[in-house]
Image: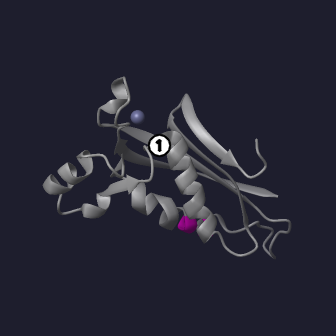
Amino acid sequence: MDLTTSYVFDAAHRIAGHPGKCAWLHGHTYHLEVTVSSPTLNQLGMVMDFDDLRDVVRKAVLDLWDHATLLAAGDPLGPAIRAVQHEAPDRIVLLEGQPTAEILTREAWRRLEEQVPTGITLERVAIRETPACGSSISRRGT
Ligand SMILES: [Zn+2]
């Protein structure tokens, strides 16, 4: 049986080298959806407690990315923003690859898979940049 929770976080990003407007630093209110499963329910009739799943997602993703600037590792904006926002160096997150919805989804999947409790399977991670545009990864390949 599956269990799904949804989250919202705000972050800035840009796609350096993009031929259009995505090259300029801008922000999104991202919507993150996480689905986990278990073949059995616990004694309370749950896959896992919603609050426990929220704690996992908060530690794995939200604490890092909410109100952060997400950039590719080689983007010169990283050091530039650090220079003027030196009080919060952890709010500049450098990724292996451009901070597209696809790369963020893949990174969120990797981080979440490391932290879901034993006996719980990560099934799906979906991130939307806008109500119309997003990316997802599913263990079941859908
Ligand atoms: Zn964007």
Residue at the outermost top position: 20
Horizontally, is 66 left or right of 84 in the view?
right
Callout 1: CB less than 8 Å from ligand 1: no
Corner quadrant of residue 39: bottom right
Residue at the image point whose x is 64% and y is 69% from the top: 116
Which residue does the numbered mark 1 point to in the structure image? 30
Corner quadrant of residue 2: bottom right
The quadrant of the picture showing ligand 1 is: top left
Q: Position of residue 92 (x, y in %)?
A: 30, 55
Horizontally, is 99 left or right of 40 in the view?
left
Residue at the image point whose x is 18% and y is 49% from the top: 80
Q: Position of residue 126 (x, y in %)?
A: 61, 45
- Label 1: few (<14), some (14–19) or many (≥20) C-alpha neighbours in 10 Å: many
> Magenta span: helix, strand or loop, mainly?
helix
What secondary structure is marked by label 1? Answer: strand
Residue at the outermost right position: 40
Residue at the image point whose x is 36% and y is 52% from the top: 73
In this picture, is 46 found above or below 95?
Answer: below
The magenta segment: 52-56
- Indicate the amino acid at tag 1: Tyr
Quadrant including the N terminus: bottom right
Q: Position of residue 9 (x, y in %)?
A: 44, 49
Residue at the image point whose x is 34% and y is 37% from the top: 16
Colour mode of the rendering: one colour
Corner quadrant of residue 90: bottom left
* Count of numbered tags: 1
In the rendered image, residue 97 lying in the magenta stretch gets the answer no
Q: Position of residue 22 (x, y in %)?
A: 37, 30
- Nearest the camera: 65 or 98? 98
Horizontally, is 139 left or right of 115 in the view?
right
Quadrant including the C terminus: top right
Horizontally, is 99 left or right of 133 in the view?
left
